[in-house]
Amino acid sequence: MRGKDVVLKNVSMRFGDFTAVQPTDLLIEAGEFFSILGPSGCGKTTILRMISGFLVPSSGDILIGGESMQGAGPHKRPTALIFQSLALFPLMSVWENVAFGLEMRDWPKAKRRERAQELLEMTALADQAEKKPTDLSGGQRQRVAIARALAVEPAVLLLDEPLSALDLKLRQHMRAELKDIQRKTGVTFIYITHDQGEALTMSDRTAVMRDGVVEQVDTTDRIYDTPATAFVASFVGENNVVRGRVSDVADGFASLESAHGNFRALNPGGLTARDEGILFVRPEKMTILARGEHGENAIDVNFLRRDLEGPFVNLFFTRNGDVFAVHLTNTKTAGQDVSGETTIAFAPEDGLILAAGELADD
């Protein structure tokens, strides 16, 4: 199996007066694990269904491996789609489920069985071939659905939030499984999710969507470290957020005047003086200063609470009704001596000042 690239050229989707996907250009490289991340209703599943052929775009063209898909239905495309529900056949054995697409292509039974067994071995299910899907765990059923999709040798595998029904530990395990399967097969994976952890963990690149618009496409590191818009910064990961107005710019940095004081941070969008801006600082980039210590980008706050999260400790502080978070590695005593009035701060290179815009809902 080898993956093919997928290209969207000015693709949009309208349902009556509602535009689910604004005109979009997108290149998904052959053989990459590509995620489309965004809140419910942003248009990500609509894009997946247009690529698969279950929806016909209102405008534009979709190319797979350089060939236009105009007029090609789902069964004429080199794609396979895995739904949230998995849709396994309960009365068929595991191997028969995997081989179902091959039966539809008139493969002889012995050859179907051989191919199914190969895929079950690849997905660590070789000893489950004769069982029914109801006899398997949730994670095993997920792997059966993947093996069945791969049986027809698609160039592009489309996955629509396939892990959403699993519990946290199983989701985390399946993330590693999916990435491993993708590496072994070389198939292009296009993965739809609203879970940023899934996208950051598995993807080579990620597109972040809002209201039918792709706001940023980049590697997972850059999506997290250098978000392009206020929405991306607030949707992917946690951030301390301060609104204000730019007072000065110099050498790639901007200064922001706000109700909590003046702050200096990176200015990746090239804001100019008097522009409205929003400061974003990740909680893990914040530090707690010693009592009486001050410096650049310091904020006087009041301690609110300490939350233990296994290997991490989250400390929360308030100032003028706003909440600030500091994220620490759990050293058993981390944050236990923090109380009352405190000063927190960050280095200018650890903050971003982006153009004011809509933030993601919590």
Image (spheres, rainbow, N blue to C red):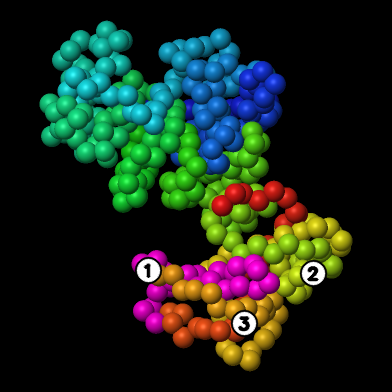
Q: Residue at x 70, y 21 (%)?
A: 17
Q: Residue at x 14, y 28 (%)?
A: 131
Task: Name the image quarter holding residue 19.
Answer: top right
For the residue labelled by badge 2, is the local secondary structure a helix, a strand or a loop?
strand
Q: CA distance from mark 2 to mark 3?
A: 18 Å
Task: Name the image quarter holding residue 281.
Answer: bottom right
User: In the image shown, does 248 or 318 lie closer to the viewer?
Assistant: 318
Residue 173 placed where, x, y %? Answer: 31, 48
| Residue where numbered disc 2 is placed | 257
Please state the extent of the stretch shown in magenta in the rendering: 309-333
Amino acid marked by disc 1:
Pro
Total marks placed: 3
Amino acid marked by disc 3:
Thr
- Crowdedness of circle 1 by 10 Å Cα count: few (<14), some, many (20+)? few
| Residue where numbered disc 1 is placed | 311
For the residue labelled by badge 1, is the local secondary structure a helix, a strand or a loop?
loop
Q: Earlier in the sequence, mark 2 or mark 1?
A: 2
Q: CA distance from mark 2 to mark 1?
A: 35 Å
Q: Is residue 17 above or below residue 108?
A: below
Q: CA distance from mark 1 to mark 3?
A: 24 Å
Amino acid marked by disc 2:
Glu
Residue 32 visible within the image: no
Residue 231 placed where, x, y %? Answer: 65, 49
Residue 291 placed where, x, y %? Answer: 59, 90
Q: Earlier in the sequence, mark 2 or mark 3?
A: 2
Q: Determine which of the numbered discs, if any, sits on residue 343 in the image.
A: 3
Residue 236 visible within the image: yes
Residue 26 placed where, x, y %? Answer: 61, 33
Q: Is residue 348 above or below residue 162?
A: below
Residue 37 in the figure: left or right of residue 123: right
